[in-house]
Image (spheres, rainbow, N blue to C red):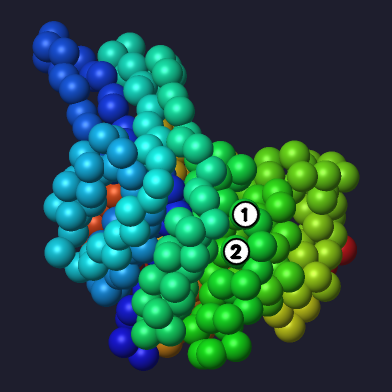
């Protein structure tokens, strides 16, 4: 397989972060959002990435320029949307992130979605793997877009990986996503898990499989992740223990690690171990979706899978 991945990132956001280094104030402006962070990690892991985005307005103009200067391995496919793109401003001068203000942007119109759907479908059909990521606010994208995209890509040879929650997750699962990554918090918030323990989370993952998903990977913050494979086996995923600098983005890096292995023709267990290693590396850095591929590969050997039975 070629190692080509399409990332569906319908509504990236402009991120503005204020920091203090050596007594001086610094302003950092970057493109952000789940799909953007996943694309960065995928490129670090040696994938050719087609990043499909919708941007608009004054913020969108800035976003387009910044997105165009990401890793050379990321090819940008931009659709101009009718309304402005979202943004957020964070203050990290005291070490912890404090949100000053944010706006996810308005919902995409039917015309926006039609154009973005066609762009993403074409790129996805040319890719080995398609990653479906979510917007900052789920109301921005009609949920059925994810069902159709998962079904159309999956039935035409592209392996679909979904990293979603709520109605968007349900839609992608109904479309037959081959691999689903979801956090334990999302399963609890969606009412899919009855408790925050392994048996309840495994039951929730098995329900997702019954609804149409293939393998389901449940991230659990500092606890071992859970992998429920499409053949019914269950494993706990023990990643390397590293000090946390910023936990944000670990799940996105995990998804990227999974997609990278699948895009290169690797097996699902290798994909799970690589995802765990990529997620662990991300928490050691301030940049979301960042980290060198060589570091991820080194950490894979420190990740283990253990069979689990009720």
Q: Residue 104 at what x, y percent from top left?
A: 47, 34
Question: Are the residues tagged 1 and 2 within 8 Å (C-beta)?
Answer: yes
Tag 2 residue: 145
Taking the spot 30% from the left edge, 69% from the top edge, the residue there is 49
Within-10-Å neighbours for mark 2: few <14, some 14–19, many 20+: some
Does any portion of residue 22 appear in the rendered image? yes
Vertical comparison of 105 with 294: above or below: above
SS under mark 1: loop
Q: Residue 116 at what x, y percent from top left?
A: 43, 63
Occupied quadrant, residue 310: bottom right
Does any portion of residue 35 appear in the rendered image? no
Vertical comparison of 14 with 99: above or below: below
Marker count (numbered):
2
Q: Quote the CA–CA distance across marks 1 and 2.
A: 6 Å
Taking the spot 36% from the left edge, 90% from the top edge, the residue there is 1
Vertical comparison of 248 with 273: above or below: above
Within-10-Å neighbours for mark 1: few <14, some 14–19, many 20+: some
| Extreme-top residue of the structure | 23
- Judge left or right: residue 159 versus residue 261: right
Looking at this view, is 77 or 200 the one in front?
Answer: 77
Q: Residue 69 at what x, y percent from top left?
A: 15, 52
Taking the spot 75% from the left edge, 74% from the top edge, the residue there is 212
SS under mark 2: helix
Looking at this view, is 248 or 111 the one in front?
Answer: 111
Looking at this view, is 133 or 205 the one in front?
Answer: 133
Occupied quadrant, residue 128: bottom left
Mark linked to residue 142: 1
Occupied quadrant, residue 168: bottom right
Mark linked to residue 37: none
Q: Residue 201 at what x, y percent from top left?
A: 78, 53
């Amino acid at each position: 397989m070629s190692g080509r991945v399409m990332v569906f990132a319908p509504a990236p956001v402009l991120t503005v972060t204020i920091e203090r280094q050596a007594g001086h104030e610094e302003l950092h402006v970057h493109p952000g959002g789940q799909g953007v962070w996943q694309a960065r990690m995928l490129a670090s892991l040696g994938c050719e990435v087609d990043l499909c985005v919708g941007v608009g307005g004054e913020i969108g103009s800035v976003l387009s320029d910044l997105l165009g200067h990401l890793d050379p391995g990321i090819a940008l496919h931009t659709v101009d949307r009718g309304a402005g793109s979202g943004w957020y401003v964070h203050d990290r001068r005291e070490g912890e992130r404090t949100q000053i203000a944010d706006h996810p942007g308005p919902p995409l119109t039917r015309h926006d979605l039609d154009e973005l759907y066609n762009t993403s479908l074409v790129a996805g059909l040319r890719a080995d793997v398609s990653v479906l990521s979510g917007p900052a606010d789920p109301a921005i994208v009609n949920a059925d877009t994810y069902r159709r995209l998962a079904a159309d890509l999956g039935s035409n040879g592209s392996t679909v990986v979904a990293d979603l929650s709520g109605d968007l997750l349900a839609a992608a699962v109904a479309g037959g996503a081959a691999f689903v990554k979801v956090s334990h918090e999302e399963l609890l918030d969606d009412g899919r898990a009855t408790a925050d323990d392994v048996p309840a989370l495994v039951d929730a993952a098995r329900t997702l499989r019954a609804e149409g998903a293939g393998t389901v990977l449940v991230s659990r913050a500092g606890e071992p992740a859970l992998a429920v494979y499409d053949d019914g086996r269950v494993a706990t995923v023990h990643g390397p223990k590293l000090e946390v600098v910023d936990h944000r983005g670990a799940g996105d890096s995990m998804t990227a690690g999974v997609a990278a292995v699948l895009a290169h023709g690797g097996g699902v267990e290798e994909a799970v171990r690589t995802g765990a290693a990529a997620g662990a590396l991300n928490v050691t850095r301030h940049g979301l979706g960042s980290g060198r591929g060589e570091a991820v590969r080194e950490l894979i050997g420190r990740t283990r899978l253990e069979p689990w039975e009720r």
